[in-house]
Amino acid sequence: MRLVNTRYVEEGSILARQVINPAGKVLLQAGVRVTASYLSRLQSMGYDVLFIQDDRLEDVEFHIAITARTREVAYKTIENVSKYISSPESCLQVDNIRLTIQEMINDLLYSSDVLGNLTEIQGFDDYTYHHSVNTTIIALILGIASGYSEQKLIELGMGVLMHDIGKIKIPEEILNKKTPLTEEEFREIKQHAIYGFDILRKNNDLSLLSSHVAFQHHEKFDGSGYPRGLKGSEIHEYGKLAAVADVYEALTSKRVYRRAVDPNEAYEYIISQSNSHFDPQILEIFQRHIAVYPSGTGIILSNGQRGNVLKQNSAFANRPFVRIFYQDEDALTTPIDYNLADHPSLMIIAVDNR
Ligand SMILES: [Fe+2]
Ligand SMILES: [Fe+2]
C-alpha cells in the first residue's frame, strides 16, 4: 500500500486502510473500492491523502499508534471532561480518565519502536478534542521512550489529555478568530494555561503534576514562554514533553483555514527550536522515536529518483527504507530498494504522494 493524495487517487482504487474520522468512527473499511462520490466527499471533509493498495508495495510496514476503538474512547473522555467543566457542580471523573490513558498506553506498548504512522488518516473536526488526543499519543510515545514507569506515564497522559482544558473559559470568537489577534486577545488566550491549572488542581485525586502539564505546556526552555517565563530545569519534564508534542501536533494537523505542514517541515521546525523553545534532551528522544516520513509516503531523492517509504529505521528517523520506481519521469524496469541509513549521500528532498 502507499499514500496517495486524494487529488491523484484513481476511481476504482482499493483502500488499503480504513478511513476514520477524528472521533475514531470508521467511515470506510479497508478493501472498499473508491468511487468518485466517495472521493469528493472525503475531500470536502478534509482528507488529503488515503492509503491505497499497491501490489508493488505489499510489504510496507504499518504500525498504528492506537486503535480506532481506543481513539474513540479517548475522544469521548475529553469531550465529557469539557462538558463537566461547563457544569461545575459535578467533579472530574478521574478514574475514567485514568482508564482511558491506561488503554492508550497499552496500545502504544504494542506498537513499533519508531512510529511512522501516529494516527490513521483524519479529516478535520472539532479541533480541541482531536488535538488533545493526538498530543497525548505523541507525549506518551516520548514518555515510553524515556523509560517512564506506568505511574509516570499515567500522570503525564492525564495531564496532556487535559492540557488545553482552560480554553473552555476563553470566548469562542477569540479562539476561532482567523485574522491576527490583538495584543489584548492574545493576553486572554495565554490565560488558558492558568485557567486549566486552576480547574484541574481542585481535584484531589488527580496528581498535582498532571495539573502542572496544563500550567506549563507553553513555557519555553529559554524562559521566553508563558505564563510564568520558567526556564530550563524550572520546567517539569512533563511540561517539556508536552510542549514538543503540542507544537508538533499543531503543525502536522490540518485546520479548516490552513493545510497541514508536511511532516518533514514540521520536524525541521521542531529541531530548529532546540535550546530556545525545547529542551535538547527531549528532542533527542523525539528524533529517535517519531519518524519524519510515515510508511507508505511518496518521496523524491536528491538523485532524482522517486518512490515510497517501506519501513522505518530505528535510530534514523529521517532515513527510512525506501523502494524506488522512477528515475526522474522514467519508470525503472526493476524497482530498487535502499536502506537510506546505508546511503548517507542520498537525501529525501521532497514528499510527493502522486
Ligand atoms: Fe495550549
Ligand atoms: Fe495544545
Image (cartoon, rainbow, N blue to C red):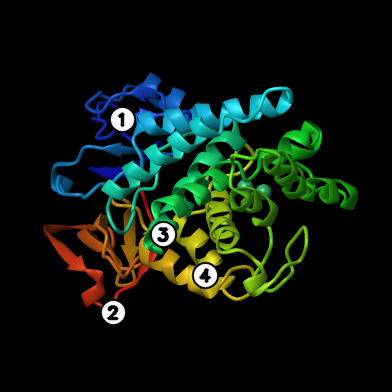
What residue is drawn where x is 79% and y is 48%?
Answer: 191
Q: Where is residue 345 in the image (x, y as percent from the top left)?
A: 29, 80
Q: Name the residue under label 4.
A: 271
Query: What amino acid type is highlighted by mark number 1?
Result: Gln
- Front residue of this view, candidates 299 and 158: 158
Choose the circle earlier in sequence order: 2 or 1.
1
Q: Mark 3 points at which residue?
A: 148
Choose the circle earlier in sequence order: 1 or 3.
1
Query: What amino acid type is highlighted by mark number 2?
Result: Pro
What residue is drawn where x is 33% and y is 53%?
Answer: 116
Q: How far apart are marks 1 and 3 (CA)?
A: 32 Å
Q: Do callouts 2 and 1 mark residues in contact (Cβ within 8 Å)?
A: no
**SS for dot 2:** loop
Q: Where is residue 105 in the image (x, y as percent from the top left)?
A: 38, 45
Q: Which is more foreground, mark 1 or mark 3?
A: 3
Q: Where is residue 297 in the image (x, y as percent from the top left)?
A: 32, 51
Quadrant of residue 300 within the rendered picture: bottom left
Q: Name the residue under label 2.
A: 344
Q: Do callouts 1 and 4 mark residues in contact (Cβ within 8 Å)?
A: no
Choose the circle earlier in sequence order: 4 or 3.
3
Choose the circle earlier in sequence order: 2 or 3.
3
**SS for dot 3:** loop
Query: What amino acid type is highlighted by mark number 4?
Result: Ile
The count of marks equals: 4
Q: Which is more foreground, mark 2 or mark 3?
A: 3
Q: Distance between the residues labelled 4 and 3?
A: 23 Å
